[in-house]
Image (spheres, rainbow, N blue to C red):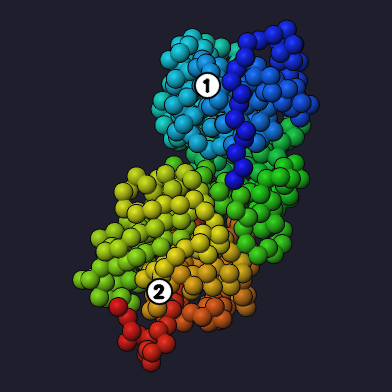
Amino acid sequence: MMRPAPMPAAAPATPVTDRLAEQARLLLRDGRAEEALPMLDRLRHLGAPAAAALRAEAMLQLHRLEEAEAAADAALLEAEDASLLRLRARIRLARGRHAGAVDDAAAAVMAAPEDRPARLLLGSALLETGRHDEAIWFLGEAWRAEPGNHALQLRLGQAFLRAGRYEAASELFLHCETAAPWTAGVSALRAQAALLAGDAEAAAGLARAALARGVVDGAVHSVLAHALVSLGRLEEAGPHFAAAARLAPDNPYIAHLAAAAAGTATDRAPAGYVITLFDGYAAHFEQSLLGLGYRVPGLIRRAVERLRPRSMQEGLGPVLDLGCGTGLVGAALSDLLRGPLVGIDLSRRMLEQAATKGIYTELRQADLTEALPAEEGGYALITAADVFCYFGLLQEPLTLCRQRLAPGGLLLFSLEQAAPGETWRLGPEGRYRHAAGHVTACAAACGLEVLECRPEALRRNGESSAPGLLVAAWAAKPQAANPRAARH
């Protein structure tokens, strides 16, 4: 990895460097970072005091975040003040380094207690780390200091929304929408608050009212589509997912749902879709699933007891938990572990929740198709609870799992069940459904032998249950004539 060249030692400012710095600031203020680069290179060569800070701002605008943080580090070595701490906090937020952003923003507030941008930044950083009550306090303080600032009011409402305090969020959004109806995002957030509070009818009504007023916002179409899906009106939802995708063409989350609503076959859900879905879901994931009677961790536990009975006395491990989420499967198996438990997930926020359980030897943020080839050694057990439902074609993940299983190792995974006559298809809710016969054939083609492929209800789905499959496959030992006799 190439590292940025070190900053020359700062030299005294001169009229030339002052003039260059001022021109660069004006360009950066207007968002023209690319045009500012030649001036910044010259300032850097001259060792101007402002060079590092201005370069950090430019790299942030250009989304060259590693270089931005290196430049901010260099600027802070020269002089630590609130504005530079705020700048590095913004960079760290953009990089997803939220704990570091909290540290910088808190230091900025301590350095300048009346600095409103610093307090706002601290509230935003705390929100990203899940410290909702603290975030609400700082954002509330910032808004009370500027009660006419509707962007601040909106951010405070989002904090209440993240904290699950939907009534308070709704009140703020209503007040903001009444006072400044064209505030970007307010209509979508108000409808989203109603949807998250469980009132899909109200959410759909609010979204339709915003569209009728002429609000052009992909997020409004998205909330309306989600509300219609919740109401079981899937055909009506499709055009709104499509409209949301047109208005936000670079959003993988919306693109995948639009494809699902249109019945467009894709091989797998994009990583960006999965990250967006589960980062947004992490704080309330377990509460929501338990409320739906989620059964998969318990089904996996019982499959281990049934297929590896000796593990009840001798223990289990090493174990790889793919798509570990908040650690529900790890918790279900925790008393059986006698070796490492490794968790892999795309969602950083889900991993943060899993870490609080204190049962994982290692947690890694990665796509399983990239993480598995890099793994070394073999696992006695690999689990994938509701992970392969984000893959249409199963050959790649099953082959990679086979390569990472120790001889005789067991793979346990759940899937949503396809309708009779289908092999696999992308459902309108964005998950893939698979037929039992198709799964068995795929596993065999990947060098796995299926021990069980059991129809199971995975959770409640409205008034009915979500039909699924619990699949147990093993990496057969060549010398074993009977796979069930080889259980351990």
Residue 151 shows up from this direction: no
Residue sitting farthest toward the bottom: 481
Q: Position of residue 147 (x, y in %)?
A: 56, 13
Disc 1 element: helix
Residue 230 visible here: yes
Q: 359 or 459: nearer the eye?
A: 359
Q: Note whether 238 is above or below 392 in the view shown.
A: above
The residue that mark 1 highlights is 76
Alpha-carbon neighbours of circle 1 within 10 Å: few (<14), some, or many (≥20)? some
Considering depth in this image, is 306 or 197 the residue closer to the camera? 306
Give the image location of residue 423, x and y in percent.
61, 75
Side of 481 where 88 appears, left or right: right
Name the amino acid type tagged 2.
Answer: Ala
Pick the residue in front: 442 or 207.
442
Q: Residue at x 58, y 64 (%)?
A: 391
Residue carrying label 2 = 406
- Residue type highlighted by circle 1: Leu
